[in-house]
Image: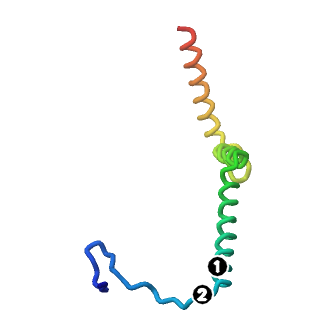
Amino acid sequence: MTSNTPTPGGLEARPPDKRPERTPAEIEADIERTRARLAGTVDAIADRVKPANVARRGVESAKAQVVDEQGNLRTERVAIIGVGLAAVFGLLVWRRSR
């Protein structure tokens, strides 16, 4: 027997919802709407993970780090990147000469 008293986990047993019977045509229409929605979701995911799009977003993100909204170069960030690259290059040359 079910009751509407809360249980310690916060779940309560309820009788199933009483819905009016649906016709086969209504069920088929519902399935078709769900299928179309799912197809759109799959297409959106496929577009998002497409390697060319991932690469484009990566380039845009990197570019945003060194160019401001007006298209001007952020010289302080370019200088930091240059120093970092010089340090890595110097480390490689030093390691190779040892």
Q: 90 above or below 46? A: above
Q: Which mark is residue 67?
A: none
Check disc 1: other Cα within 10 Å, few if <14, some if 14-19, many if 20+: few
Direction from residue 32 to residue 96 in the image, left or right: left
Cα gap from disc 2 to disc 1, whole angstroms: 10 Å
User: Closest to the observer: 54 or 97?
Assistant: 54
Q: Residue at horizontal 59%, vertical 15%?
A: 93
Image quarter of the N terminus = bottom left
Residue most extreme to the bottom = 20
Nearest to viewer (mark 2 / mark 1)? 2
Mark 2 and mark 1 in contact? Answer it, CB < 8 Å.
yes
Name the image quarter holding residue 74.
top right
- The residue where tag 2 is placed is 22
Q: Residue at horizontal 54%, vertical 91%?
A: 20
Looking at the picture, how far across and down is residue 34, in whole percent? 64, 72
Mark earlier in primary sequence (2, 1): 2
Q: Residue at horizontal 63%, vertical 81%?
A: 27
Amino acid type of the residue that numbered disc 2 sits on in the rendered structure: Arg
Name the image quarter holding residue 63.
top right
Amino acid type of the residue that numbered disc 1 sits on in the rendered structure: Asp
Looking at the picture, how far across and down is residue 78, in whole percent? 64, 37
Direction from residue 98 to residue 41 in the image, left or right: right
- The residue where tag 1 is placed is 30
